[in-house]
Image (spheres, grey):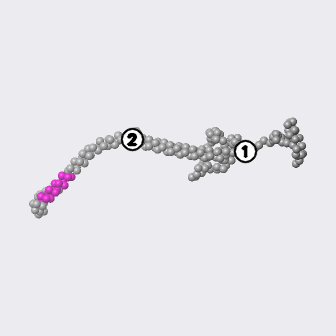
Amino acid sequence: MALTRAMLKGMGLSEEQISAIIDEHVSVTNALKDQIKTYKAEAEQLPIVQQELDELKDTVKKDNWQKKYEDEHKAFDDYKKDVSAKEALSKVKSAYKKLLRSAKIGDDHVAAIMKVTDFSNMKMKDNSDELVDADKLTESIKNEWKGFIPKTGTNSSPVDNPPKSGNDPQDNSNYARQLEAKYNQNLYGKAKEN
C-alpha cells in the first residue's frame, strides 16, 4: 500500500502536515533507491571478484606457500641447532684443552691430541665451564697420553770418584807439590790426620 495525499487527507491531517510527511517519505525512499543502486552495482561486480578469488586460490595452490613456509621454518630451526651445537662443541674443546694443559701435556702436542680426540661423548656441566667427570678425564689423559707429558726435575748423575781439584795438600802427584809439601812439613811440622 502506497502513501498518498488522499489517504493522509482522509486521516484528517492538515495540508502542512501532509506535505511534511510526503517530503520525509520521499527522502527516505530516495535514499533506499540509492542504496539499491549501490548494491546492484556491487552484485554485478561479484562474478568478477569471485573469478579473481579463484585465480588467487589457484596461484596459492601452485606456489604452495604453506610448504615453502614450513621448509623455511625447518631450515631456520636446523640452522639454530647447528649454531648451538657448534657453540657447545667449542666449549667442550676449550674445556678439554684446559684439562690437557692441567695434565702437563706439552703445548706442541695439544693440537695433535685435539685432532684425534672424540668429543661426542663429552658434555659440559650445567651453568659451568667444566666438563662432566673432569677428574676421570684428567686421569684418562694422564694414562693415555703419558708419553706426551714431559719429565721435569733435577736428577744428578752419581759421581763415584770425584775429580781432584788440585788444591788437596795430600795430592803429591807432581814434583812441585811434593816440594811444597816437604817445605811446609819442615817449616810447620807434620800435618795431623783426621
Tell me if residue 28 is in the magenta stretch.
yes
Instruction: Locate the N terminus by quadrant.
Output: bottom left
Highlighted range, magenta? 18-32
Q: The residue under label 2 is which amino acid type?
A: Val
Identity of the residue drawn at 34% across and 43% down: 53
For the residue pair 89 and 104, the one nearer the viewer reads as: 104
| SS at mark 2 in the image | helix
Q: The residue under label 1 is which amino acid type?
A: Gly
Instruction: Name the residue tied to disc 1.
Output: 153
Q: Position of residue 160 (x, y in %)?
A: 83, 41
For the residue pair 38 and 65, the one nearer the viewer reads as: 65
Instruction: Name the residue tied to disc 2.
Output: 60
Location of residue 171 by image quarter? top right
| SS at mark 1 in the image | loop
Relative to residue 181, is residue 41 drawn left or right? left
Identity of the residue drawn at 64% across and 45% down: 101
Q: Residue furthest left?
A: 15
Relative to residue 64, is residue 155 drawn left or right? right
Q: Residue furthest front?
A: 187
Residue 85 in sight here: no
Relative to residue 51, is residue 36 drawn left or right? left
Q: Residue furthest bottom?
A: 12
Q: Position of residue 77 (x, y in %)?
A: 49, 45
Query: How far apart are labels 1 and 2 at the CA level?
Result: 78 Å
For the residue pair 165 and 187, the one nearer the viewer reads as: 187
Q: Residues within 10 Å of mark 1 (few under 14, many from 20)?
A: few
